[in-house]
């Protein structure tokens, strides 16, 4: 469900931009295809809930395990927060594209673009906390392959650090910008590997009923 976001991603322009108010004319020029972006915003508000469903499914594996369940509860709460931030973030992007399409105040488009980009960076921290908490629960429970838990610890830790540095890195330059960008880009595929691997283990462990 979560990966269905790519159905919309491949069909919309690359917005929000990372210009943060620099070169306003190019920011406005990036905001085309308002209907496609608006539909994408609505689509994301539905399919991104797949991340929350995944976290709830993982938590369900720790029934009767009080210590692990506590970490899993944190994972669900943090993942829900990340989805809320991401949906609101792209909602601002949709608002910017409609303002740009109406030919209204250029500064409004630039402001919405910058706010959306900043909010999109705030998604990584909560995702990292969710993955880290879920991976710790997996490792403590010994119900999952050990390597899978450590993959989650790695990706979650990197995402947390990237989430802390991300917004500062957007407006910076040089090494700080590069490091912050790497810590919000490199861990994401590792997170996907962990998510898919965990889902496979959970699916295979599901009790079949006649």
Image: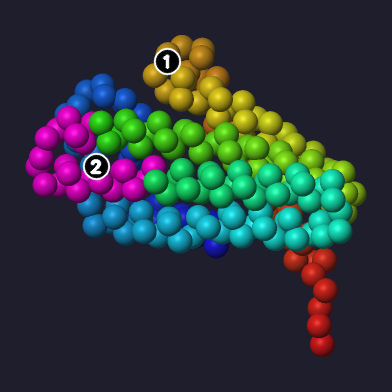
In magenta stretch: residue 106: yes
Q: Position of residue 99 (x, y in %)?
A: 17, 44
Judge left or right: residue 131 versus residue 147: left
**Residue tagged by mark 1?**
172
> Does label 2 or label 1 sit earlier along the sequence?
2
**Residue drawn at (24%, 42%) of the image:** 96
Position of 99 relative to 144 (above/below)? above
**Residue drawn at (81%, 83%) of the image:** 209
**Residue drawn at (39%, 42%) of the image:** 89
- Picture quarter with the N terminus: bottom right
Position of 104 relative to 25 (above/below)? below
Q: Is residue 136 visible?
A: yes
Q: Position of residue 92 (x, y in %)?
A: 31, 43
Q: Position of residue 2 (x, y in %)?
A: 54, 57
Question: Crowding at label 2, few (<14), some or many (≥20) Cα neighbours within 10 Å?
Answer: many
The CA span between labels 2 and 1 is 24 Å
């Amino acid at each position: 469900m979560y990966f269905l976001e790519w159905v919309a991603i491949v069909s919309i322009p690359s917005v929000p931009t990372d210009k943060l108010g620099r070169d306003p004319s190019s920011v406005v020029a990036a905001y085309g295809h308002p209907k496609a972006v608006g539909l994408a915003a609505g689509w994301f508000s539905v399919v991104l809930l797949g991340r929350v469903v995944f976290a709830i499914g993982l938590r369900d594996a720790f029934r009767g395990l009080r210590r692990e369940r506590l970490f899993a509860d944190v994972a669900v709460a943090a993942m829900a927060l990340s989805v809320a931030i991401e949906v609101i973030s792209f909602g601002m992007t949709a608002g910017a594209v409609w303002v740009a399409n109406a030919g209204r105040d250029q500064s409004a488009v630039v402001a919405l673009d910058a706010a959306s980009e900043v909010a999109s960076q705030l998604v990584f921290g909560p995702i990292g906390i969710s993955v880290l908490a879920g991976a710790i629960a997996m490792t403590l429970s010994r119900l999952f392959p050990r390597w899978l838990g450590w993959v989650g610890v790695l990706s979650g830790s990197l995402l947390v650090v990237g989430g802390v540095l991300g917004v500062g890195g957007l407006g910076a330059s040089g090494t700080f910008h590069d490091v912050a960008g790497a810590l919000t880009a490199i861990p994401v595929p590792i997170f996907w590997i962990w998510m898919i691997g965990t889902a496979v283990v959970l699916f295979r462990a599901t009790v079949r009923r006649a």
